[in-house]
Amino acid sequence: MKDEIYKALVEIVGEEFVSNRKEELYIYSRDSGLSDPSFPDFVVMPKTVEEVQKIVQLANREKIPLVPAGASLTLSGLTIPQRGGIVLDMRRMDRILELNRRGRYIVIEAGVTQGKLQSFLEENCPDLCHSLPEAPPSATVVGNLLIHGQGNLTQPYGFNSSMVTGLEVVLPTGQICRIGSCSLSPYWFSIEPLPYLAGLFLGWFGTTGIVTKLGLKLFPKKKLRDVELFVLEDPNLLVEAIYRITHTEMAEDVTTIAQPYPLMFRGTIMIGIYITGDTEEELEFKRKIIWESLGEIIKAKEGGFMALMPEMKKGLLEKPMSSLTRTADILKGGGFVYCGAIIPIEKFPDALRKLVEIAERNGITYAHSGRVIGRGHCMMFAFAFPFNRGDPESMKKAKKALHESYAATLEIGGVPWKPGAEEQKMILEKMDRGTVELIGKIKALLDPNGIMNPGNWEVRL
Ligand SMILES: Cc1cc2nc3c(=O)[nH]c(=O)nc-3n(C[C@H](O)[C@H](O)[C@H](O)COP(=O)(O)OP(=O)(O)OC[C@H]3O[C@@H](n4cnc5c(N)ncnc54)[C@H](O)[C@@H]3O)c2cc1C
């Protein structure tokens, strides 16, 4: 049977783009996080939507699990084929299809990476940009949106997934459909005002369909960008400081950092405030308004701006910020996992306390980074743990700390972001029963044979 499936896949995409070789499947059996590996039977790299459609039809007919994958960089095992089957590597579908400059949107295929889109815009349209996450440039834009990612424009505009203007999806039964204005017009400018069908695919981890094309909002890119670091010690005061900063509506991005290494950072919390402007004057104006908003805290000597050495400033202004991975690699060995908790900002002090407790209890170190979402509507709070991949004991401790962080997130009233299969179960257990049932019904309706990324968002009706 496996030989027949292999032959059928070769017929669809050509021999060069299918593999059942152990050494190639190995790469798709794991990610850079701490999830247990599991091998697929085949990996396929389609080039066209018609090829995707034929693969989906084959998988549906033969009831073979199908796992769509971008760069597999979530760190939570979301593309590890838990029940074998076919991994659909989307990275050959990497065309940028349309740039609508006046309408500030772009239409791309599912395999376009963050790096490719970033350099395309820099070259072809330097006055526009998209919301760029700190993920490595090889991460796909679609993979990021499908997990409700966040980037440098998330503070003013919300989750990256709210920036989608259109979708083309191959449903688990093989039907192709379009979502948004592109379903009735040649223009991919908006999901609204039609029924909000994008919600059937965003946040579902590839369990409801394969996204093949996506329309994405672009935003004005100012010529100049600068960063200020506001430092304080009291986590309660951070909540107030962020309220004041976001009230000014002057920042492009607001991030948080708290970590015990390097030692100079220990005991402090830093708020990274990014400002942009087309002129030095605009930049100065925004800087002044933000400084004034924090004036009382500075006057009370409860916080202050840190003078930034040029090297440090350069690192903070890098897009994406590679220093993030360097800091995470503090134990050497290249291991780093995090539980990204989406929490109300007022819960920052509780989350930080829990993070320190979890690290101490497990005898490991931590690194927190966070990002404000919307104008302070919530934030992503990363409970991050570096580990040494060469040391199984340190991996075990990080895994336990990670699990405890998910539990802590739920305990303080937060929602874990991009949870792995085990953590999805924790979420579903706590979730309102009616909502769980609705998730189950939607999945059963769209994917009657349960072939799509099985093991994820699994509900027994
Ligand atoms: C150092 C580092 C920093 C990071 N910083 C950030 C950050 O600042 N912000 C942020 O948001 N994330 C961050 N991440 C997390 C993650 O890497 C990114 O969100 C990344 O963009 C995910 O894209 P991907 O291509 O790796 O997705 P994948 O892991 O390949 O896929 C994600 C999910 O979507 C599904 N999927 C993928 N493609 C399709 C498709 N075409 N159709 C249907 N389903 C599909 C997969 O099955 C999976 O469930 C970071 C990760 C690292 C390692």
Image (cartoon, rainbow, N blue to C red):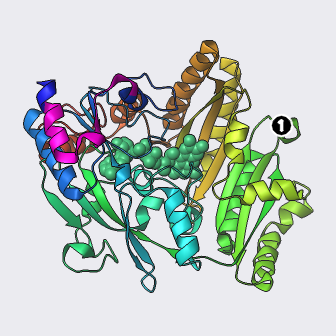
Q: Tell me the residue at 12%/55% (across/down).
A: 175
Q: Tell me the residue at 21%/66% (across/down).
A: 178
| Rendered location of residue 302, percent (x, y) | 87, 54
| Rendered location of residue 455, percent (x, y) | 29, 30
Q: Residue furthest top?
A: 393
Q: Tell me the residue at 80%/82% (across/down).
A: 280
Give the image quarter of residue 404: top right
Mark 1 nearby-residue class (10 Å; few <14, some 14–19, many ≥20): few
The stretch drawn in magenta includes residue 21: yes
Residue 272 is at least partly visible in this image: no
Location of residue 170 with respect to 80 vertically, above or below: below
Location of residue 221 with respect to 256 vertically, above or below: below
What range is drawn magenta here?
Answer: 5-23
Residue 427 is at least partly visible in this image: yes
| Rendered location of residue 142, percent (x, y) | 40, 55
**Kind of residue at disc 1:** Pro
Q: Is residue 416 left or right of residue 424?
A: right
Pick the residue in front: 78 or 440: 78
Location of residue 371 with respect to 30 vertically, above or below: below
Pick the residue in front: 259 or 10: 10
Q: Is residue 451 left or right of residue 429?
A: left
Q: Is residue 79 left or right of residue 228?
A: left
Which residue matches tag 1? 262
